[in-house]
Amino acid sequence: MKIIVHTATGLAEILQSARKARGMTQAQAAASLGIGQPRLSALETTGTASISLNQMLALFALYELELCVQSRDQSDLHEAREDQPEW
């Protein structure tokens, strides 16, 4: 499934859902990243906590998610070509 994120709150919801889908508590996930549970809670609920890019990528890996960056060009969003990778 591909989800386009436009806000920190949107990302927070995805991260919370992914953690729960893995059956992890906030404390377990936070410990894996080396941050406190209150910080992860703030990230998941309001999207206001800041973590480093390395910590965010580690969180994605922990939840078995991938980060995909692509152009906002509308023709790219609606036109999939078989000879081009989906990146």
Image (cartoon, helix red, strand yellow):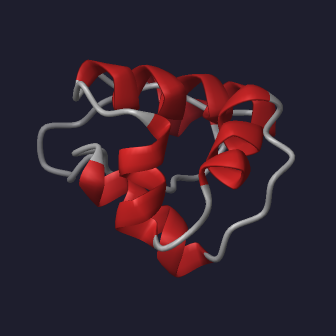
Q: In this image, 13 relative to 64: left or right?
A: right
Q: In this image, 74 relative to 77: left or right?
A: right
Q: Quadrant of residue 50?
A: bottom right
Determine if residue 27 is in view: yes
Residue 31 percent across, percent down from the top left = 41, 62
Q: Quadrant of the C terminus?
A: bottom left
Residue 46 percent across, percent down from the top left = 83, 31
Viewer-closest of 87 and 7: 7
Looking at the rendered structure, the number of numbered marks drawn on it comes to 0
Viewer-closest of 44 and 86: 44
Residue 43 percent across, percent down from the top left = 71, 44
Q: Quadrant of the N terminus?
A: top left
Relative to 49, residue 12 above or below: above
Residue at point 60% right, 49% down?
A: 37
Q: Quadrant of residue 41?
A: top right
Q: In this image, 31 relative to 45: left or right?
A: left
Residue at point 48% right, 39% down?
A: 26
Q: In this image, 8 relative to 56: left or right?
A: right
Residue lying farthest left?
A: 82
Viewer-closest of 38 and 20: 38
Relative to 12, residue 62 above or below: below
Determine if residue 7 is in view: no
Residue at point 30% right, 33% down?
A: 24
Residue 18 percent across, percent down from the top left = 37, 28
Residue at point 30% right, 30% down?
A: 80
